[in-house]
Amino acid sequence: MPLSSPIRSPLSSAIRGVFERSRGPAGPLPAPLLTAASVTVINETSANASVSANRNNGVLYWVATTRATQPTATQIKAGQTHAGSAAPAAGSQAISESGVQTVFGGVIGLTQGTTYYLHFYFETDALEPSNILTSASFVPADVTAPVLSSAEGTQTGALRLEDRYFAA
């Protein structure tokens, strides 16, 4: 018997059968799913956003709207609100890994003091649709530190160096 031929015995066949049954057939992938939408306001016109995806290929779409009412997948892909008008901000990006997806460049073009919601939608390369996920509401606000505009006025109780060391 040449060394290159496999060993055929009832035991090796039984072990191979157990191994093949334990692996099971390769089943379908889970449906695309978006979870954990997060938004952090940066300043009065922009915010950072992220969402988690369970699949590693396709395109993530998002729109910012002033209503919690979810647009359809077609509207999100077109950058529209649920009413079909242009969303204040919208975008899309490729997904190449599953897990947290950060919106590239952030969400820009927002108006200070306006309440917004982000609506996310994901479609795989095989055109499998995900759920539509809506973030909690957020309001871009002025987060700039105040700037002192005038240095006029007096200090009370200030100790000058010459008062302490050069007093007569």
Image (cartoon, helix red, strand yellow):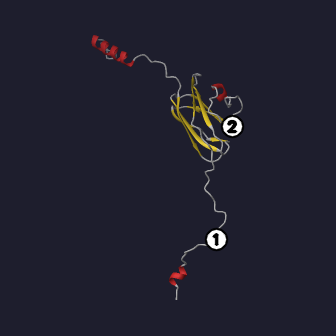
In the rendered image, residue 107, in percent from the top left (x then y), is placed at 63, 40
Give the tally of numbered discs: 2
In the rendered image, residue 101, in percent from the top left (x then y), is placed at 55, 35
Q: Residue furthest right?
A: 85
Say the numbered circle drawn on residue 153: 1
Q: Compute the Cα span from label 2 to label 1.
A: 45 Å
Task: Identify residue for label 2.
Answer: 88
Q: Secondary structure at mark 1?
A: loop
Left or right: 8 in relation to 98: left
Q: Residue at x 54, y 77 (%)?
A: 159
Residue type, numbered disc 1: Gly
Nearer the N terminus, badge 2 or badge 1? 2
Q: Please say whether residue 5 is visible from this viewpoint.
A: no
In the rendered image, residue 124, in percent from the top left (x then y), is placed at 57, 25
103 relative to 25, above or below = below
Residue type, numbered disc 2: Pro
Residue closest to the eye, 95 or 79 = 79
